[in-house]
Image: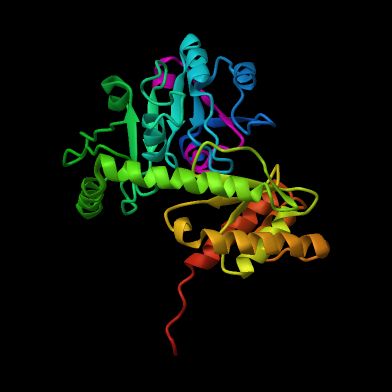
Amino acid sequence: ELAKERGIENPEIICCRNAHGALDKAAHYFGIKLVKVEANAKTLALECSEVQAKINRNTIAVYASAPSFPSGTVDPIEDLAVLCKKSNLGLHVDNCLGGFYLSYLQRMGVFKRKFDFEVDGVTSISIDVHKYGFAPKGVSVVAFSTKELRRLTIHPVSTGLTLYVTPTLQGSRGGGVIAAAWATMMYYGQNGYEQVFTKLHEVKNRLEEEIERIPGLKLAVKSDLAVIPIAGDGIDVYKVASLMEKRGWSTFTSQNPPLMQICYGEQHLRVMDELLKDLRECSEDVLKNPNLTVEGDAAVYGAAKMLPNEVLDDIMKSYIEVKMTVKPLPGA
């Protein structure tokens, strides 16, 4: 809406290539061009100089992550805010994965940088209460730095037979999950969340220490929170992920660079030893048998490298169509 007021007909948003895929979907729906820049090779975070080089007359905002999903690293929000304010741009902070968790790490003195509305220049923040807030899904929040910005998101309909206006794009929203989220937050309270995140930080530290000791694996970067990004050290990390999947572990993988990630939570307190044992054995198997075939979810990225984007997009659409297909009734 601000872009329209400023006469921008072809708006652009600058983001890191590791930004969450939901941004691509939103940009497609709203007719906004996404300008993607590469992450810093060492930090796997958004680079201010890369952003500055892409700013032009059509740029309306910069999208930053706190943290990014593939690497668990927090972008340099304070530096980006200075740049955005100087250029009169919006700065959105994707705090969906890090919501609650990152705030408490900051409160506990573990995370030293600022990333939210404490930073002059941050204009909006998104938070998933269902992740490290532990609430049911369906209560994600987007917050704005000013009432004026929030007002731009409201679209009233006054030309129909009835007056219609809702606070969100979604329209109708069930009150049950909102009540459940409130009850969850009341249950944990400030002290409860702090106790959980203290334990999770210990989980993170132990995972990082032990993974560095496993032959064939290394940390792609020391993350800030939530995700441990693991790279192969002389081996194909997708093959390790494939073997872990066969053993029943839920890891996820990403490309450019090829990584396997562990998104850790409270359950890892109970299964830490078993997880590390299997991870060590799977890495040893790949070292001994480098010609192992990648199977399961991890195999997708190997195939993706050989396909044009247009073909891959079509395959992904077909995948959703198959999942959405309703089986006919017996005898129908």
Q: Measuring 36% from the left and 20% from the top, which residue is drawn there?
A: 118
Q: Nearer the viewer, residue 157 or 60?
A: 60
State the quadrant of the N terminus: top left
Residue 78 in the image, given as x and y percentages of width and height: 48, 19
Residue 139 in the image, given as x and y percentages of width and height: 30, 46
Q: Nearer the viewer, residue 7 or 139?
A: 139
Indicate how the structure is coloured in the image: rainbow
Q: As drawn, is 96 to the left or to the right of 33? A: left
Relative to 290, is 45 above or below? above
Q: Measuring 22% from the left and 37% from the top, which residue is drawn there?
A: 165
Q: Measuring 45% from the left and 42% from the top, which residue is drawn there?
A: 97
State the quadrant of the C terminus: bottom left
Relative to 315, is 102 above or below? above
Which residue is the extreme one toward the bottom? 331
Residue 84 in the image, given as x and y percentages of width and height: 49, 16
Image quadrant where residue 15 sits: top right
Q: Measuring 68% from the left and 31% from the top, which residue is drawn there?
A: 42
Whether residue 200 is visible = yes
Residue 8 colored in magenta in the image = yes
Relative to 82, is 131 above or below? below
Q: As drawn, is 187 to the left or to the right of 217? A: left
Q: As drawn, is 177 to the left or to the right of 265? A: left
Q: Nearer the viewer, residue 178 or 101?
A: 101
Residue 71 in the image, given as x and y percentages of width and height: 58, 41
Which residue is the extreme one toward the left? 162
Whether residue 299 is visible = no
Q: How many marks are shown on the rendered structure?
A: 0
Image quadrant where residue 90 sits: top left
Residue 59 colored in magenta in the image = no
Relative to 43, is 119 above or below? above
* Magenta residues (range): 1-26
